[in-house]
Structures are given as C-alpha cells and as structure tokens.
Amino acid sequence: MVRSQAVDAPVQILLLKSNSWVPNNPRLPVLIYIKAIAVQSSDPAALFEKTFSANGWIPQWRYGIYDFHHYHTEGHEVLGIASGFARLMLGGPDGRVFEVSAGDVLLLPAGTGHCNVGSSDDFLVVGAYPPGQHPDICLEPPTPDQLANIDLLPFPGQDPVQGLHGAVSRYWAQALSAIS
C-alpha cells in the first residue's frame, strides 16, 4: 500500500522574464516546494502520483528531465523528484541553476524553460499536468499563437501538492488578479 506523504513544505517563488528564445511566463511564478513529499517507500514515484492525482493533476510519465533547453505552451507542468538529485537550469540559456533532490517538487507555469545540466544515475521524476493539458516540447522561439496559448491556458483548480488552499491559490491567483 502506498500512502501520500505530503508535508507542509517551504515554497520558493521565482518569476522569470523572457530569456533569449525562451518566453518563460511573465505573469505566473515558478513554485519550488522544498522536501514536499516524504519519500518513504519502495516505489517513491507512486507517492508523487498519488499526491498529484488527489489534487486533480494527472500523472503522465516517469523519467528524468531532458538535458536540452525546452518549454511547454500547452500545459503547466509539475515535476516531482522521486529519487536522486540534479542541477536544473530554469529560465532558458543563462538561466538560474537550482539543485533538487528526492522529495522536492517544481511547478512550472507554461512557457518556463528548463534543462537538466547534471544528475545522479538514479534521478527519477514524475511529471503531471492539469486535466486537458500536456507537454508539447518547444525548442525554438514561440510563435504569436503559442504566446497567446501560454496567456490563455486554463488556470489549475488546485495546487498539485497542497490542494485547494495551497501555494497555487496564494501565488498564481494573486498574480492573475494583479493584472485583471
């Protein structure tokens, strides 16, 4: 049996501006949950899948993170670090490097550039998305239609880790109301 082990983790907020050919998201910040899931099972990825599913985010894959800069225009993406550690560059070329390890979660709003710049052999990530959203892999500057899609992408109903009253409602809703 797998029990969700979500904890009240500190959340780091990072608002990224456009960087080279990567649009990032000028309205919604990246949310980094430090040690959000207590990884205590023989299948730690299942803990992330259960937590994300319980909060309305659909797990779609278990893998690493690509070692090339890319972003998505058709889905906000949550990445749960199930095992190992990595150095991830967020924001595109010349972006900021963050060290992540088992138990950490990153919530990337659509448009956010990300790239694995080095990881342990056991690095494993669970990727999930709000209903109806998915990860198109973008490797070039966005078209006007892609930029419009990033702006119009539906807002997730719940935080993937903390649920209804989590960081998404505090930081993303706040960002959206500020521009309304």
Image (cartoon, grey):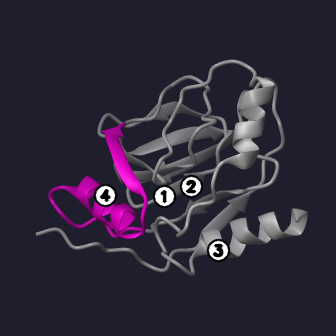
Residue 151: image tag: none
Q: Which residue is mark 3?
A: 169
Taking the image as shown, residue 155 lies to the left or right of residue 25, namely left
Decide which of tag 2 and tag 4 comes sooner along the chain. Answer: 4
Q: Nearer the viewer, residue 100 or 114?
A: 114
Give above or below for 169 relative to 111: below
Q: Nearer the viewer, residue 125 or 122?
A: 125
Q: Which residue is mark 2?
A: 107
The residue carrying pointer 4 sits among few (fewer than 14), some (14 to 19) or many (20 or more) residues within 10 Å by Cα, namely many
Residue drawn at x 72%, y 47% as measured from the top left:
152
- Residue 82 visible from this viewpoint: yes
Residue type at mark 1? Answer: Val
The residue carrying pointer 3 sits among few (fewer than 14), some (14 to 19) or many (20 or more) residues within 10 Å by Cα, namely some
The secondary element bearing badge 3 is classed as helix
The secondary element bearing badge 4 is classed as helix
Residue at mark 1 to residue at mark 2: CA–CA distance = 7 Å
- Residue 23 visible from this viewpoint: no
Picture coordinates of residue 159, whole percent (x, y)? 53, 68
Q: Which residue is mark 1?
A: 105
Q: Which residues are magenta?
A: 37-63
Pointers 1 and 2 in contact (CB under 8 A)? yes
Residue 49: image tag: 4
Picture coordinates of residue 58, whole percent (x, y)? 38, 54
Give above or below for 65 relative to 107: above
Residue at mark 2 to residue at mark 4: CA–CA distance = 14 Å
Residue 38 magenta-highlighted: yes
The secondary element bearing badge 2 is classed as strand
Residue at mark 3 to residue at mark 1: CA–CA distance = 16 Å
